[in-house]
Amino acid sequence: MTDTVSIIIPCYNKRPYVTTAIESALSQTHPCEVIVIDDGSTDGSLDEVKQFDGQILWETGPNRGGSAARNRGLDRATGSYVQFLDADDILPPEKIAVQMSALQSAPSNAIAFCPWSYFHDDGHQDAPDARRYWRGYDEGLALLMDMWRHGGFFPPHAWLTPRALIDEVGPWDETLTGDDDGEFFGRVLAAAGEVRFCDQTRVLYRDPPEGSVSRNTSLKSARSFWSAFELIANRILEKRDDQTAKRACLSRLRKTAYAWRAVDEIVDKAAAFERKLGVFDFSPGLPRGTRYLIGLFGIRRGLHLRQLIKA
């Protein structure tokens, strides 16, 4: 297979890391174009990017957020497949070649994913935290529901996605400031056909440094996480309004409420959605004790009882 892959790297104030990310993209053994969109960095990141002029496509502009930068990368991309790579993460040289080989005999709407593990600024790499859904699936929706019910996630660079599938589901949602990747790849999975798991390779996901979007604890971020959940949950339930789908959505909404349990607005919205789903489950994505309290008494009362027990 000779299809070109476009590697899109959004960059905002990642000077210590962006050079390594770009080098890992350029080291791919499969033909790739590398596109770096500097999102108005103020720390000298752009100087690092410019060192690769002639080897990559790059541009800069005002700070508009990671989703806007990725969408701008899509505007410039010419590849048949798209690889997203955050500016502080790393691809091993064979990553794209392995996944392209896996997709060679797959339907045109198939996607590929692979194991991942944390790595740290001191060079230490954690062992992969394997989950029960680290396997292939006949359809992306089934993988999405397993992920939602049992907890866990994949970073953006674990996936390799056909450009045609991205065009079908639409660009990144630039209104989201938290879990924008979960919402985007949730749409991709809900529309995807076969999903091929490639355990011959593994990507490295940097343990989030200070300033990471994933550590944003603002009310705006909480609302974004809820919006991301609601958008994908409604999409799942439109496709499959059965007990399996409802339990997957229930587990995800409970995990979202648990993560934002200090925000009454999110807990209230989750409790209302929980009542609407109308199913019983102990939601294995939650911590063990909490799952039983919430499963028996519901989100609001379960979280209250948890707080009383801790006190």
Image (cartoon, helix red, strand yellow):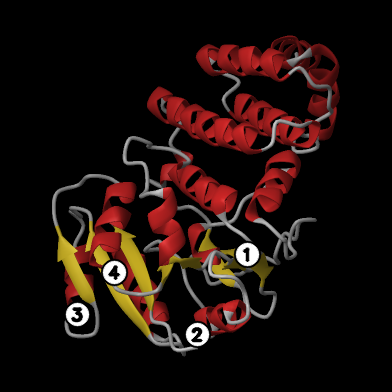
Look at discs 2 and 4 and give the one toward the viewer.
4
On the image, numbered disc 1 is attached to which residue? 117
Q: Residue at x 62, y 12 (%)?
A: 272
CA distance for labels 1 and 4: 27 Å
Tell whether 204 sits left or right of 49: right
Q: Nearer the viewer, residue 210 or 213?
A: 213
Closer to the chain start, of discs 2 and 4, is 4
Which amino acid type corresponds to the residue marked 1 in the rendered image?
Ser
Earlier-in-chain disc, 1 versus 4: 4
User: Could you tell me if residue 163 is visible in this image?
Assistant: yes
For label 3, count other residues whose C-alpha is less than 10 Å away and answer few (under 14), some (14-19) or many (20+).
few
Q: Amino acid at mark 2?
A: Pro
- Quarter of the figure with the C terminus: top right
How many C-alpha atoms fall within 10 Å of the one at disc 4: few (<14), some, or many (≥20)? many
Mark earlier in primary sequence (2, 1):
2
- Tell me the crowding category of disc 2: few under 14, some 14 to 19, or many 20 or more residues within 10 angstroms, Cα based: some
| Label 2 – label 1 distance at C-alpha | 16 Å
- Label 1 residue SS: strand
Report the mark closest to the observer, 1 or 4. Answer: 4
Q: What residue would you read off at disc 3?
A: 51
- Badge nearest the viewer, 2 or 1: 2
Residue 50 or residue 140, whichever sits in front: 140
Position of residue 147 relative to residue 115, above or below, is above
Please identify the quarter of the rendering in which residue 111 is found: bottom right
Residue topped by disc 4:
77
Residue placed at 51% from the left, 79% from the top?
A: 96
Label 3 to label 1: alpha-carbon separation: 29 Å
Who's the residue at 45% across and 25% down the image? 223
Q: Quadrant of residue 31?
A: bottom left
